[in-house]
Amino acid sequence: MTPADSAFVRACWGTSVPHTPVWFMRQAGRSLPEYHQVRKGIGMLESCRRPELVTEITLQPVRRHGVDAAILFSDIVVPLPAAGIDVDIVPGTGPVIGDPIRDMADVRRLRPITASDVDFVASAVRMLVRELGATPLIGFAGAPFTLASYLIEGGPSRTYTKTKTMMYADPGLWHALLGRLAGIALEFLRAQVAAGVSAVQLFDSWAGALSEADYRRYVLPHSAAVLGGLADLGVPRIHFGVGAGVLLPAMAEAGAEVVGVDWRTPLSRASAQLGPQVSVQGNLDPVTLFAPREVVEAEAARVLAEGRAARGHVFNLGHGVLPDTDPDALTRLVDFVHETTVQ
């Protein structure tokens, strides 16, 4: 069997599957003791630049949990240094930008990236494809809006005041910035596909801060440029945002075979909004995993039942695995999904 024949890829395309495939956002990382052991003393960005380390961390949850897909260990800001951005990932804070974007001169200094700028990522992908065999590997990038929010705010934000102020007050500057970021995200994803990933996910983590009208006017054209720029590559495209229930149809319009749904929106409702041409991914609340096993399984059964309304369903959480999650709870959840959906 090849990755193209896997349950994960088949579910993305909406074809028949032997069981509902399952993987978890942030499965490679903070919940695993073996992750902390191999990353000890190494910063996040540096970790992402070491192909052997990326390979080991990416493989850890596949070995431990038996998930149906691996996702490349990386971060959405990884391509930004090649574009000329001073960025660091600060423990407990997240990405911090040394010189935030304020005007057109700042936008113009954003350089396009090439595949050679991120050759360390391609090296890791090639290693992983050899190691994973029939298990598919997911590549990913940050969507233009979410990248822009970090570049404008200077780091994480709860209100996105500076971001939305630029969007409303200077649309020309806004679209120039997002156009450049779309080019960076597209090149980053195409490099990953060229190296061998079987699917890609575009993370628009903070798109839920927008109304549907604003999303369509200020963001959708740029996300569509990224996803549309991958259409010739023949791999499934997943589009995910947090708190984006009202945006789901627009996110599908951007050019995705799969739309990720967070825990706030039932998959049955999402499927009705998305129609028969789109698969869904999600959407167990990550906090559920702290509950007793019978509660986790009851909630997982509900998600699986709701997911049957879609043409295809990839089981996942509604956002990333939380750092204090018991790894054994994740393993049990994978087993439960497989055992209860086997055809």
Image (spheres, helix red, strand yellow):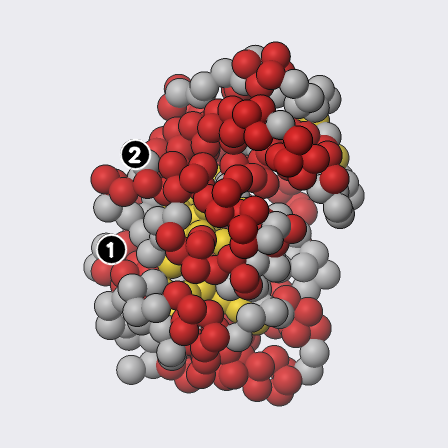
Q: In the rendered image, which residue does mark 1 sit on?
A: 4
**Most foreground residue, 214 or 156:** 214
Residue 148 visible? The answer is yes
Q: Is residue 155 visible?
A: no
The total number of labels drawn is 2
Task: Give the Cα separation between the discs numbered 1 and 2.
Answer: 15 Å
Query: Badge 2: how crowded within 10 Å, few (<14), some, or many (20+)?
Result: some
Q: Quadrant of the C terminus?
A: bottom left
Residue depicted at 62% across the width and 87% down the height: 294
User: Which amino acid type is marked by label 1?
Assistant: Ala
Place residue 5 in its image quadrant. bottom left
Residue 194 percent coordinates (x, y): 30, 34
Amino acid type, residue under disc 2 in the picture: Ala
Left or right placement of residue 148 versus residue 113 in this view: right
Q: Is residue 155 above or below residue 299?
A: above
Q: Position of residue 329 (x, y in %)?
A: 61, 72
**Against 115, is 292 above or below?**
below
Residue 221, position as x, y percentages in the image: 43, 39
Instruction: Pick the quarter of the image with the N terminus.
Output: bottom left
Q: Nearer the viewer, residue 334 or 302?
A: 302
Which mark is on residue 196? none
Determine whether the residue tagged by mark 2 lies in a helix, strand or loop: helix
Residue carrying label 2: 194
Residue placed at 70% from the left, 78% from the top? 291
